[in-house]
Amino acid sequence: MKNFFIAIIISSRYYFPMTKNNNARIRELIARISRIMAAEEWKDEINPSQWAALSYLAEANRFSRAPSQVAEYMSATRGTVSQTLKTLARKGFIEEVRSDTDKRSISYTVTKKGKKFVEQRQALEDAFHLPDEALATALVQGLETLVRNALRRRGQRPFGVCETCAHNRKIKDGWFCDLLQEPLKSNEIKQLC
């Protein structure tokens, strides 16, 4: 499967009609890739929704691991995500953490088993390897723009990496989030918030 997605992108003109406008074509291709990925994701012991939640939690910083934030990131209902998180916890991929200050407030951390699973699943990314770096960069930028536009239309906020956030600033001892008024650990600036 290493170059499977390259073949889809490069040779898609042979498999799909080119009579549609670009917007419809982009949607069609993304939907097709999503179905292929979902089919791959059903092969493991967790389903695609559980994988989406687990992979998000593996990348999220300590401020972004509450069930409501997972639901927002996944564009899913809180009830659905709550069941997904409970299943992941029962399977040993994540652990629930109660707040020391407010016992009603919970967040999740990824267990060693969950981290190992995420690392193994990263192998699927090899299928997305594009030999042309300029093409890969353009594709990433284009997809990021599509995601931002879709979220904006839905009235949802985008998630991003702390180091690129306007609220993140360098201080003498490291980094500081001006929005949350919290210092950041060096590894957190590479995580989703």
Image (cartoon, rainbow, N blue to C red):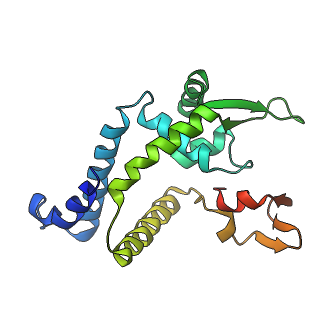
Q: Position of residue 10 (x, y in %)?
A: 20, 67
- At x 63%, y 32%, the residue is 94
Q: Is residue 92 above or below residue 169?
A: above
Task: Count numbered badges in the picture.
Answer: 0
Q: Is residue 121 above or below residue 191?
A: above
Q: Position of residue 190 (x, y in %)?
A: 65, 61
Q: Position of residue 67 (x, y in %)?
A: 65, 37
Asked whether, in this view, residue 21 is left or right of residue 177, the answer is: left
Asked whether, in this view, residue 148 is left or right of residue 12, the answer is: right
Q: Position of residue 170 (x, y in %)?
A: 80, 73
Figure quadrant of residue 142: bottom left
> Nearest the camera: 77 or 94?
94
Q: Quadrant of the C terminus?
A: bottom right
> Nearest the camera: 189 or 79?
189
- Specify whether residue 177 is in view: no
Q: Residue furthest bottom?
A: 134
